[in-house]
Amino acid sequence: MRTTFLVSMLSAALLGGAACKNAEEKAESKFEKAQDNVREQREDIRDEQKDVAKEQKDVIEEQKDVAEQQRELAKAQGDLAQARSEFSLRMKERMANLDAKFNALAAKTDEKSRETADKVRAERAELQTKLNALGTTAEADWDAFKKDVDDRFDRIENEIEGRY
């Protein structure tokens, strides 16, 4: 019986040792997987940090581009304001010359001169209304506005000079 008991104990010890060894292997495997996961997560974080740094650099460059575009826009707006001012002065001078020619035409007493003066008077009023809108003309319509004003001046001047 003692022998049986000893064999039983020895068997139990061997089985227990095997079970323990199996549990150790599982724990070690689990530990290694956890280490691999931590290593992968660290690499992912490094990659994401690199991506964020690159994106921040791109944002900074885009902000520089926006600032440059804003400077260019401000310059263009200043140039447009100056062009409007110069155009306005030129049109005032041209209107003064037109008025002098109109007054000379209106002073004539023949029928054709009076008819032309009446027609030119209405066109001049329309032109003055158009010039009064100079400050409110949209930037997109500026070229068309200038062309229309120049054409109206030319038409009125040609009518007056045709009768003058």
Image (cartoon, rainbow, N blue to C red):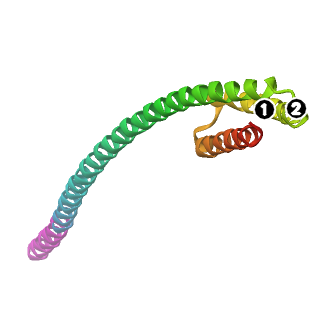
Q: In which quarter of the image is the C terminus?
A: top right
- Disc 2 residue crowd, few under 14, some 14–19, many 20+, Cα 10 Å: few
Q: In which quarter of the image is residue 90?
A: top right
Report the front residue among 155 and 33: 155
Magenta run includes residue 11: yes
Would you identify the image quadrant in which residue 101 lies?
Answer: top right
Q: Quadrant of the N terminus?
A: bottom left
In this view, 66 is above or below 49: above
Mark carried by residue 70 = none
Residue 33 sits in which quadrant?
bottom left
Q: Badge 2 is on which residue?
A: 110
Q: Which label belongs to residue 126? A: 1
Q: Does the magenta stretch include residue 65?
A: no
- On the image, the x and y values in percent for residue 13 come to 12, 68
Q: In front here: 51 or 103?
A: 103
Q: Which residue is drawn at 43% across and 38% down?
A: 76
Residue at x 33%, y 40% (from the top left corner): 68
Q: Residue at x 89, y 35 (%)?
A: 115
Q: At numbered mark 2, what does the secondary structure look like: helix, strand or loop?
A: loop
Residue extending furthest right? 111
Q: Nearer the viewer, mark 2 or mark 1?
A: 2
Q: Position of residue 126 (x, y in %)?
A: 78, 32
> What kind of element bears circle 1?
helix
Which tag, 2 or 1, sits closer to the chain's start?
2
Drawn side of residue 146 relative to residue 45, left or right: right
Crowd class of label 1 (few under 14; some 14 to 19; many from 20; radius 10 Å):
few
Count every numbered label the image shows and give the total: 2
In the depicted view, which residue is nearer to us: 55 or 30? Answer: 55
Above-or-below relation of 114 to 27: above
SS majority, magenta = helix
